[in-house]
Image: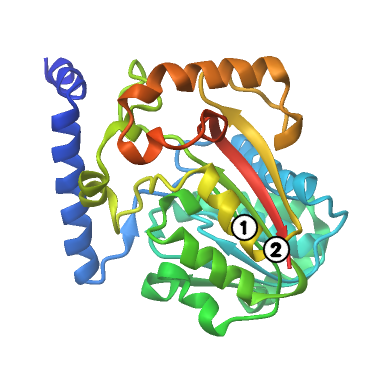
Amino acid sequence: MIVKIKSILRQSTCVIIALYIFRNAITHIKTLFKNFNSDGGATHRTFSLDESIKYITNVFNDYKKVSGKQKFYGKVAELGPGDCDGVALLFLNDGARHIDLVDRFYSLRDTAQQKQILDCLIDRHPKLSGLCPNLSKYCIRHYGKIADKGRFFDKQKEYDFIVSRAVLEHVDAPEIIIKKMYGALSKGGYLIHKIDLRDHGMYPPEKSPLKFLEIPNFLYRLMTYGSGFPNRFLFHRYKTLLLSLSCKVKFFCTGLYGVEPFQEIYEIENIPQDLKKQAITFVDKNKCHFSNEFKKVSSEDLMISSFFFVCEK
């Protein structure tokens, strides 16, 4: 009965808005008391060991694939690494000399599970065993307000790579953070980031995945600002911002609205025409319901549900 009632309530936009405003208020109260613990970022909590290793390896390999780099090197920062240092270890194994892990919230985790994951990675990559006694010297965690709105990069500079996966859609001021990260790169350094533009479960799956674009901005801000919920900073805004910073930017599509998930990573200009047409048609069918801000955006930009960008300084 309770499950059924919850399911019915989740069909109501008014209920969803009220719930998110309440959750947002609770998060702000916790932050005032310096409680930065969060269930967000607990990627590995439900994974088996094999699933965790596969996930970590795929994340790292995606960074290599879109960047075109044979080897990573130098000084690296990972934004929002969540509950696991696994990707950081693979950067060190590949040739990085130092990596900073920057997270506003502390993701709750099973420490025994995390030790098992890291031990497995070390067994598979013997080079890491030499780093183990002093791992905290090469791989450093940073939490709390220092990680908010890019403050960390005000003083920390000369990075060769700054990376993240499904993080920037959760921050309050992506423009500010991206500019600060770009400023923190050494000359020839790279930003490599994957963005997931979907609603992250705000509406039940039977609703349109674009329904969260119908909520007016003033309400959406009350629902999400400061809590890590999706910020609705969409592909067209990333494109405009990044092209204003550098002419050396590439965009790679990893998901389209209205299209079945695909494994291929397409450069934006090389998305197959049949998939592109299907996605634009889907957006056009929903666009009349969008809030005014999004009605003005081209369907070709709105069709992107997830993507990578690689920006060289």
Mark count:
2
Give the vertical position of 255 relative to 171 (above or below). above
In the visual, does 209 lie left or right of 227?
right
Image quarter for residue 236? top right
Q: Are marks 1 and 2 in contact (CB under 8 Å)?
A: yes
Quadrant of res 104? bottom left
Residue 219 image point, x, y percent: 20, 45
Where disc 1 sits, the SS reads helix
Whether residue 116 is visible here, answered yes or no, is no
- Image quarter hosting the N terminus: top left
Q: Residue at x 17, y 46 (%)?
A: 21
The residue sitting at 26% across, 45% down in the picture is 220
Whether residue 313 can be seen here = yes
Could you tell me the amino acid type at mark 2?
Ser
User: As rendered, which of 179 and 48 lies closer to the eye?
Assistant: 179
Q: Is residue 211 left or right of residue 244?
A: left
Q: Amino acid at mark 1?
A: Leu
Is residue 207 depicted above or below 66 in this figure? above
Please state, as top left, top right, bottom left or bottom right, where the C terminus lies in the image: bottom right
Instruction: Kindly identify which residue carries mark 2.
Output: 246
- Residue at image coords 60%, 35%: 51
Q: Position of residue 173 (x, y in %)?
A: 41, 61
- Local packing at callout 1 (Cα closer than 10 Å; few below 14, some 14-19, many 20+) is many
Q: Which residue position is annotated with label 1? A: 242
Q: Is residue 22 left or right of residue 180?
A: left
Q: Picture coordinates of residue 198 (x, y %)?
A: 45, 35
Q: Position of residue 310 (x, y in %)?
A: 70, 53
Q: Residue at x 48, y 71 (%)?
A: 150
